[in-house]
Image: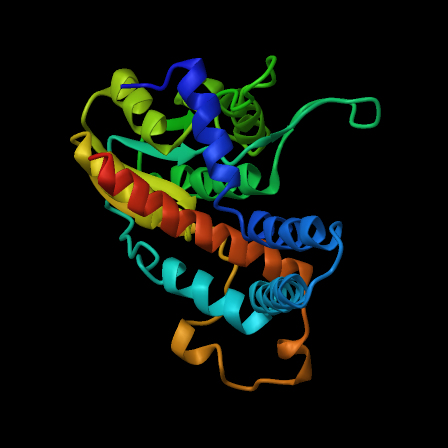
Amino acid sequence: MELTPFFFGLYKFVKYGLYPLTWVVLLLGAATVLALFPFSPTRLRWVRRLVIVSLLLLLTISNPLVATSLMGSLESWYQPAQLSPSDRFDAIVVLGGGVNERGSLRPAAEPTSYSRNRTTCGVDLFQQGHAPIVVLTGGDARVFGTGSKEAVEMQRWAVRLGVPESATMIDTDARNTYENATGTKRLIGPASILLVSSAGHLPRAVPVFIKQGFRVTPAPCDYASQDLPQESWKDIDLFDFMPSTTAFQHTTEAVTEVAGIVIYWLAGKL
């Protein structure tokens, strides 16, 4: 069952609590509150502990080796689809990854790099003749107000890449992975599909679609990692130990995906 606006907003709020940056901010916030009061030996010890833990946590989640290991573990879950030219499916399903809204600088809404890369992968599979239609799924994930529909912008990108609009179907209501699956089921029913998404997202997406009755062949793309986790520690240099904003982002994505898998499992959606 899809989330009501209230519970979707609650879901988004809880999701922020899973971000590593939130953990760092809460720890530093607690240290700041303690520092506002007159110091005592006990309070000073707690301030020092909170600051040290915050620094260690920040260094850990922004470490490239940590980020690569976490993302690599998720991205190696499903290997790239080994397809022969004769392999056929009912549809290629591409999951949305966000949209950049129109603004005073950006002249028009456009798919984020995640949505664009996923759509490009889906288009490649379509042009290889593996399915007659491309299903693009993703709606407006804003809690307040309204915004652009992910699937609409993805469809425009697919058409620009050469897919006839008549060979596309869009689901503009889905706001999360579960609704991607249920919305696609309403469009085409249980079917054999090539499921296209970022490699780190598929460990959660594949079982959700299987639960809805689809016969799923994963088609991972948009990799963040270069090597398998056991190979990522080869040829280490000094920069692999230095904090990186890219590593911070990848660690955040990995942590939220793992948390999403656990939450979906507890909710019976996997």
Label count reads: 0
Q: Nearer the viewer, residue 36 or 263?
A: 36
In the image, residue 87 above or below residue 44: above
Q: Position of residue 254 (x, y in %)?
A: 46, 55
In the image, residue 96 above or below residue 151: below
Q: Is residue 118 left or right of residue 4?
A: right
> Where, by quadrant of the figure, is residue 77 drawn?
bottom left
Quadrant for the N terminus, please: top left
Q: Position of residue 51 (x, y in %)?
A: 66, 64
> Which residue is located at x 46 percent, y 35 percent?
14
Is residue 176 visible to the viewer in this orientation of the structure?
A: yes
Q: Position of residue 86 (x, y in %)?
A: 24, 46
Q: Nearer the viewer, residue 131 or 145?
A: 145
Q: Position of residue 215 (x, y in %)?
A: 18, 38
> Which residue is located at x 41 percent, y 30 percent?
176
Quadrant for the C terminus, please: top left
Q: Nearer the viewer, residue 73 or 78?
A: 73
Q: Nearer the viewer, residue 100 or 28?
A: 28
Is residue 119 visible to the viewer in this orientation of the structure?
A: no
Q: How is the image coloured?
A: rainbow
In the image, residue 188 above or below residue 37: above
In the image, residue 46 above or below residue 231: above
Q: Residue furthest right?
A: 105
Q: Is residue 117 left or right of residue 39?
A: left
> Which residue is located at x 16 percent, y 31 percent?
213
